Amino acid sequence: MKLPMWAVILFLLIAAGCSDNKKPEGNQDDNGHSAGKSSSEPEVETIASELQEPWEIVKSENTLYISERTGTIVEISSDAGNVTRKPIELEEPLAEVPESGLLGLAFPESFTKEKEAFVYYSYSSGQGVYQRVARVKKGKDSWMETGVLLDDIPGGQVHHGGRIEIGPDDKLYVTVGDATDKSSAQNRNSLSGSILRINQDGSIPIDNPDPQSAIYSWGHRNPQGLAWDEQGNLYATEHGDQAHDEINLIKPGNNYGWPEVEGDHQQRGMETPLIHSGEETWAPSGIDYKNGAFWFASLRGEALRKFDPEANSQEAVVEGYGRIRDVLASSDGIYFITNNTDGRGTPSKQDDRLLFLSDE
């Protein structure tokens, strides 16, 4: 039986609509980063783009500040979106080995009035690489180093740590990697492989585990994130050796085992992590706390992750943007920065970016 002409035309239109001309499914654009989002995926907003090897995010009033390893600090108005990049004038030349440069950035409460902050940077001196915790002051067109709090922190080819945070006790906490000298993490006379705690004038707090030493905890490989819960408990992220990346609950004076133990391995007098990545790799960096959970950046794991300390579990919340270096929890959501221009990622035309995940 012959079909009427209108039925033939309708059939051809339906077939054309179902042809293979549509794009394959997925949420990646031509640069390998997140494009369209399904209704089940979180909405992520780009706040700023074309950052240069960004490392740490700090917020003061309505302005976000981001340190860049190249030696600049970016200012981003969170309400107007204006972006300003200012160089930082340091007393020592920035080191150019991997994982070095201008790293940590922390603002005391007095910043709004005094315009002084703290930085952690790697520098070259002679044939060596060292780290320094310094005080810097914001000027009209640049920042300038105005004082040294802690110096001659050993450096190497990699594993420089670099996170600095002001704790709820108003002390300055500093993460230091083993600088590829594994044994130094078990040497109490070396600052390598440790988390340090100092006063904001650079002196040693009298209630440190050793009142003559800045070392707060030791036996770390390459810790890169610090955050406190509402009870004042300190948590830290740490890079494992190939895998076994960790989140640790930090207790003063404790030994976290590197290089003697990692993962689930145990040894008397050494701590085991709350959670680790097993045979997978997170390469965790910055971490922050909000509403009972810790949000942390994942570099090689390429995700913004969420750790639930009650359930002792973690999950990837946002993926598809490449390497993530730092996170900052705010009242209305989570800021985080990509780190695809650091020589280990595949940057898109917009990278690196400051992104925002809303709670609403």
Image: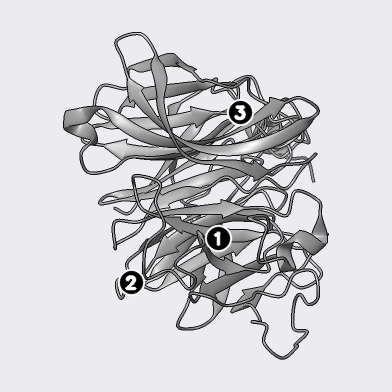
Where residue 90 sits: x, y (%)?
A: 51, 20
Asked if 129 appears above or below 293 in the picture, the reply is above
Asked if 208 appears above or below 331 in the picture, the reply is below
The residue indicated by pointer 1 is 195
The quadrant where residue 198 appears: bottom left
Asked if 40 appears above or below 19 in the picture, the reply is below
- Mark pair 3, 2: CA separation: 31 Å
Looking at marks 1 and 3 on the same chain, the residue that comes earlier in the sequence is marked by: 3
Question: Which residue: 55% across, 20% down?
Answer: 50
Where residue 220 sits: x, y (%)?
A: 67, 64
Amino acid type, label 3: Glu
- Which residue lies most toward the top here? 141
Category of crowding for the residue at label 3, using alpha-carbon neighbours closer than 10 angstroms: few (below 14), some (14–19), many (at least 20): many
Front: mark 3 or 2: 2
The residue indicated by pointer 3 is 53
Question: Which residue: 58% across, 43% down?
Answer: 325
Amino acid type, label 2: Gly
Q: Secondary structure at mark 1?
A: strand
Where residue 194 sits: x, y (%)?
A: 61, 61
- Which residue lies most toward the bottom here? 268
Category of crowding for the residue at label 1, using alpha-carbon neighbours closer than 10 angstroms: few (below 14), some (14–19), many (at least 20): many
The residue indicated by pointer 2 is 232
Front: mark 1 or 2: 1
Q: Secondary structure at mark 3?
A: loop
Where residue 299 sits: x, y (%)?
A: 67, 47
- Mark pair 1, 2: CA separation: 16 Å
Tell which of 69 and 5 is nearer to you: 69
Kindly tell me whether residue 341 is visible in this rendering.
no
Looking at marks 1 and 2 on the same chain, the residue that comes earlier in the sequence is marked by: 1
